[in-house]
Structure formats: structure tokens, C-alpha cells
Amino acid sequence: MESTPRIRADQVRGENTRIFNTFEEFLESGLKPDIIIISTPISTHADLAMKALATGADLYLEKPPTATLGQYETLLDAAQAAGVNVQVGFQALGSLALQAVSELFGAGAENSPIGALRAVGASGNWLRTTGYYNRSPWAGHRQLNGVEIADGVVTNPLAHAVASALRIAGAQRSGDVVSVTTDLYHAHQIEADDTSVVKVQTNTGIPLTAALTVCAKEQQDPWITIYGTEGSAILYYTRDELVIRPNPDFGRPETSQTFSRVNLLENLVDVRSGTAPQLLSSLESAGAFMRVLEEIRTGSEPAGIQEEQVIPAGEGEEFHPVIPNIEHFIDRSVAAQSDFSSLGAPWAAEPESSGKFTLENPSTEQKQTVARLRTGKDISVTNSPRPFLDELKTMGGVHISDQRPLDHTWHLGVGVALQDVNGNNFWGGRTYTRADSRYVWRQDHGHIRTVANSFAPNGSSLSSQLEWVSHQQHVLLDEQRIVDFRAFNHQSTGATGWIMDFTFSLSAREESVSIGSPGSNGRLNGGYGGFFWRLPKANNPDIFTETASGEEQVHGSRSPWLAFAAEFSSDAVGLAQRDTGHGEATLIFCGDDGDPWFVRSSGYPGVGSSLAWDAPLILEPGASLARHLRVLVADGRWSGPAASSIAQEYGSDSQEDGTCPQR
């Protein structure tokens, strides 16, 4: 640890001010101050605060209050026994904007411009240089010489974001936190984290997600997102500005207001004098933050981000690594209540999955991965957790699927999803109801869990047994799903790629099951639900069937096949992959069950086959339905005649009527 420099008396204002070079000298002096301020390195807080309590003085203690949860609990017990006030230096908690946020929900959801509180997020895009971490020996350390330091992005530079978000979510004391999970990384040459996600589940039921970095291209003011059932609010806590964004359906305008801030030291003085009712950032109220700190301290060490995945900027003491597209990943993380790993950030840890699908590339005769099966266990409740195919790629390496994009965080790669199963939402997000004639947030989300998976030895086929579990934790449907990949080489056009056969059957278990959609609940042309493929950003898309062209004409049609060709680009492509992650590809969707196609390109790119377009489908107990789709994926953009030829001829088992055959 760095030594404390000696201070001359003439460096401090006040002729009668006494100067002590150690805390022990001060204690031996016999002085009895009213307030002691401790603003020293994190590792010294606990020891100095415990010594200060012996004087009977109230304390102003810099954040975080201690370096470990154990130290915090010891200090809290001692402070309560001594009967002294301890204010923790989370200055943002003095903002009157927090009182305004509380008032948003104080009169009930029906009187709030943004409805009821449903989630809180903290976002931080900061920049720190090598010089910042060279300023002292302890900077950027988790431990140093056996001493706990806890100097990571979550616990120090952007700790105010976490503390403010916890306060809004109703979590102050340690017992207010049910669970904490972390996803920690560093691009700087340090020991602690500099780019991290923390997810907190509170006992109020309000989830909190903090996504923070000091490796942004440019520094921005950090912010707290307050998600309501009828809108949202943004708190820029460093400037005490609150922006309220009501649901535009009600015609309420966006408003912005800047608030004043109470100085926490003045608040401590006022509490001592009896002119203020309570501390705004008491030691007791820091317990929830200390639970977060402890999880970071005792959890896995932050993973290093490889040099080839960052962009170097600046030189010498001004050097700082920039993580490409980190701002977008932070936005997605908070919106989807997800960590970087689960979102598939190219520098993050492998996400939770059940296995990968591999094929031999006809051109290179090398095995390559074309898709990953995700478990879905890491998906947030309101996004309806379910298994899905992720990271689908052409033989040429073009990414052709997306999951949890900002526009619809409940879109999960390729899979099966339905918005209305006996009133349960297995699609995710808001639910369209006939009673409201619009989408509303409801506590109705179900989940699909895997009972068993069986991969073929060659890694190209999968059979799964799944259960559809209601919001009340009852199994409504049993599903049998078979997915099979194989390569193809279409001689007449020269197209090469792979074919995916996707078959699923749904069986009602113990009660009659109604399968519906927004369309069956009154939304015109909104009959989505069933098989769905979310595509990544698609530039200049061509969407066509044998007889129709364009999104409007193809949407809702019952053509045997549908082609979607575009130049695709993905946010999940790393620096080393950018030459192969983007490019042109053609997908031909074939269905032999007569269901209408659900197609989107203008708002977002996606293709699905609809089970309940404009009327519900009823399954009696023991009854089942089955659907089969085949998707051909080829590199390059293929025209109408070529796509038609491929749809008719792309395998030895093709049919002559132009439909896609069953496998």
C-alpha cells in the first residue's frame, strides 16, 4: 500500500487547525470531534471506521463502506451498539430525483404515467486509461499482498449506478437481496473487472441488471432505466435529470426535469441536529450493495478479453482498450436482463448450451459448426425461457440468426413459441389481449423445459422431449422435437449449403388446451406463433414465393415455399471473424402443412409459420398436432427462378409438385 505523505500545517486552512499524520496520533490527542470523515483507500475503511467509533463521533464513510461483507456486518453491529450515525458516500443517493421516482409509483399503477414498476437497469459506458490504474498500487486489484481491495468497475468507478439502481428497486438492506449473479471481464491489464454484468433478484420481485464498462470508445453520462408496465423513465444520476417516457398509446408526452441534490455531509449534520429525519445513505441501507460486492469478491476471477478482440487507443498513460460495439451489448444486456455470455458477445464466455450441430463442408471436406442448441435456462422470466437454436451460420460463415435483439428481446434464434396457451405467454414480452385491444404487460409467462436430448453420433441430428410449463407451474403440453441437418450441393444452380428439417409435435396432457395468437385475439394480421426464425440485420432483402413478392404480399400467404435473401450482418461477430460473419445468404422455408407464413422485414427480419392465424386451435386431453418445416440455407443471393429450382430439386427425395418434401 502507498505510504501516507506528511502534511504541513500551512497546507490546511485555519491557524488553529491541528494536523496529525496518523489516525493513532489523533486518537491519542483526546480530541472529541462531532463527525469524522474517512476518505481513504477501500482496504482501510473497515479498520479506520472501527477505530473512529471509539470516539463516539458520527462518521461519513467513503463508498464502498468496506472491502468485504464480513467487515461490513461487523462494522454495522458496532455502529448500532455505539449508537452513532454512519453515512456512506454514495452521493447520488442525495438526489431529489430519487424521491420523484418513488412518487411515480407511490399512488398506484393506475395513477402512474408509466404504470407499475417491473424492472430496473443500470448502464455505464465510461473510459479509464492506463494512467488511472497506475495512480496507486492498489488500483485495479481484487487483492494486494493478502489485503482485500475490491477495486472493480462495479464496486468503485460505477458503484453509484449500482447503488442508485438498488435503491429504486427497493433493495437497501442485505436481506432485500435474494440472489446475485455476475459475468466479469477485463480488457485492461488489471486483476479486477472493468467490463461486467451483475444481475440481482430482489425480494420485492423487481429484477435489476447492471451492465458497466470503462472500456468504451467515448465516456457517456451513466444512467438508470426504470421499466414500468406502461412506459419507462431514465435517470441520469450524475446530472440528476429524470426523463419520463409514457406509453405513446395514451398520447402522453415525454417530460424531462432536473432536480437538486442534498449534500450527504450536510444531511448527516442535519440528522445530528434533529432537523432531518434520517440519513439518505445510511450504513444500514448499504447492505444490498455489499451483497453485490461480496458476490464479485468471492466469485470467479474476471476473464481476460484477448488483445485481438479490442481496439487500442491512445499512448502511454493515455492508453485505453476499446471493446468494439460494447455500447450496444450494454444496451441489450439491460433490456434483456441478460449477461454478455448469454448474448453471445464474441469475447465473452461460452453460453450455456446442450450441444452443437456439425456438418462436413462439401467445398472444404472439413467439419464445421452450423448451429448451437441453447438450453434457455439463462433467459429472463419475461422473455419466456425456452430452448432454441442459436448462432446459425452458412457454410461460408455468414451469421443468419439473432437472439434477444433490442427491438424484441424475447426473440430467440430458431425454435417454437406461442403467445397464448390457455392464457399463458410462451412467446415472451407483452401479451395482446382482446379485452385491452393492445399489448399489455402481464404476469403470465410460461417456460419450456427440456426433459431429454439425444444427439446423433455424427452431431447433425437431435431428438428432444420438452414440457410446456404454465406460469402457475403446471405442465400444459408435451413436445417431441426432431431437428436434422445435412449438406447439399444443387447441381443445376451450383448452390451449396445445408438443409434443416424441423419437426415438432404438441400433445395436451391433462386438460383441454387452447392455442392462440394475437391474431386469434383480435390483432389483424398478427397471427404469429409456432415455428419462428429470427434473422439478424438484413440489408436490401428480397422476399418472394412462386407467385408473390414483397413483405406485404407474402405475409399471411399459404405458399409451399418462401425465400428470404439478403446481406446479413450480426452484432455478435468478433474482430477476427468480421470477414466471414457478414455476407449474402438465401434461406428457403418450405412447409407442407398449409399454415400461413408470418413474415417481417421492415420492422425487423423474421420468418415463421403460424398455427393459429385468426382463430384458436383446440387440443383435447391426449390429442396432438404435428408440424414439419424444411429450411434450405445457401451462401449468396439466389433469384426467383433459381430459388424455385432449388425448392423443387434440392434432394433426392424432392417432389415434382414444387412443394418441400417431408423427411
Image: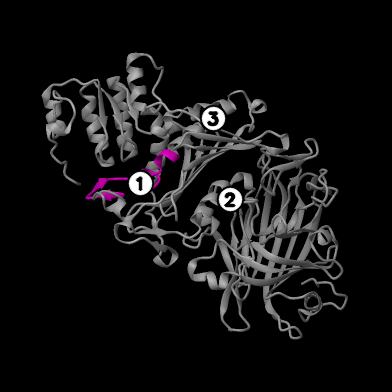
State the image coordinates of residue 266 (x, y, percent, origin top left).
34, 23
Q: CA distance from mark 1 to mark 2?
A: 25 Å
Q: Which mark is residue 379?
A: 2
- Under mark 1, the amino acid is Arg
Whichever of callouts 1 and 2 sits on the residue coming sooner in the sequence is 1
Q: Which residue is mark 3?
A: 101
Q: Which residue corresponds to mark 1? A: 297
How far across and down, in percent of the image, does residue 334 sit? 54, 46
Q: Is residue 318 left or right of residue 598?
A: left
Q: Is residue 156 magenta?
A: yes
Q: Earlier in the sequence, mark 3 or mark 2?
A: 3
Specify the principal SS of the magenta part.
loop
Say above or below: 550 vs 127: below
- Give the residues in magenta: 141-161
Q: Secondary structure at mark 1?
A: helix
Above or below, 422 relative to 36: below
Q: CA distance from mark 3 to mark 2?
A: 28 Å
Dot 3 falls on a residue whose secondary structure is helix
Q: Is 107 left or right of 85, judged from the image as shown?
A: right
